[in-house]
Image (spheres, helix red, strand yellow):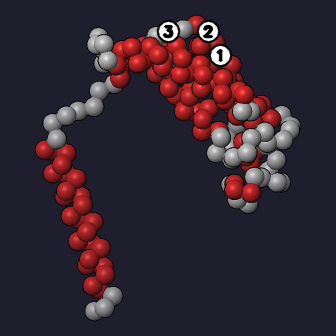
């Protein structure tokens, strides 16, 4: 009997959360749309998006270069030492590429597009044959960054 009670509680919680999700879904009339279908023509967001394109994204890529985040991908593709302090620095490259990709849709820019293509080539070259990509481990698998842990 003691073993049955936790099972009944778990089953009850699982079924009630599923019911709650279906109720929320049917009561929520808003549907997501692609960002490409959104057109801004205001004086609040549009200038900020332009500043993001002209200033923030280039500054972010420049910072990734200056702090050797890009170099980590170059080293992972070849031989070399991990060039930054933190093992999670890869994420800055990914997030900046993501933001720049959205920006290119709104404000096409050949120079930014070419830079991103080159950076994507560096990221792809650092990826292992099995698809694994984590420069803190890939650069020197025998001696990964202490925060990266001993196993992938």
- For the point 72% across and 28% down, which residue is it? 66
Q: Can you name the residue that lies furthest to the bottom here?
A: 1
Relative to 90, is 54 on the left or the right? left
- For the point 75% across and 36% down, which residue is it? 72
- For the point 53% across and 22% down, which residue is it? 56
Identify the disc placed on residue 111.
Answer: 2
Relative height, residue 43 to residue 135 (above, below): above
Q: Secondary structure at mark 3?
A: loop
Q: Are marks 1 and 3 in contact (CB under 8 Å)?
A: no
- Residue 40's spot in the image, x, y percent? 31, 14
Q: Where the N terminus falls, by quadrant? A: bottom left
Q: Which residue is mark 1?
A: 115
Q: Which residue is mark 3?
A: 108
Pick the front one: 150 or 145: 145
Report crowding for label 2: few under 14, some 14 to 19, many 20 or more residues within 10 A (C-alpha). few
Q: Secondary structure at mark 1?
A: helix
Report crowding for label 3: few under 14, some 14 to 19, many 20 or more residues within 10 A (C-alpha). few
- Residue 135's spot in the image, x, y percent? 72, 42
Relative height, residue 144 to residue 135 (above, below): below
Residue 124 is at least partly visible in this image = no
**Which label's residue is closer to the chain start, 1 or 3?**
3
Relative to 53, is 146 on the left or the right? right
């Amino acid at each position: 009997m003691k073993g049955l009670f936790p099972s009944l509680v778990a089953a009850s919680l699982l079924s009630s959360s599923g019911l709650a999700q279906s109720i929320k879904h049917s009561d929520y009339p808003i549907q997501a749309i692609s960002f490409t279908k959104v057109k801004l023509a205001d004086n609040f967001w549009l200038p900020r998006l332009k500043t993001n394109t002209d200033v923030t994204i280039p500054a972010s890529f420049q910072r990734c270069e200056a702090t050797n985040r890009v170099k980590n991908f170059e080293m992972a593709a070849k031989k070399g030492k991990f060039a930054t302090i933190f093992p999670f620095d890869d994420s800055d490259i990914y997030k900046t590429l993501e933001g720049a990709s959205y920006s290119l849709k709104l404000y096409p820019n050949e120079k930014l597009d070419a830079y991103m293509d080159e950076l994507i080539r560096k990221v792809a070259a650092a990826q292992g044959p099995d698809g694994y990509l984590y420069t803190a481990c890939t650069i020197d698998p025998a001696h990964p960054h202490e925060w990266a842990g001993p196993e992938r």
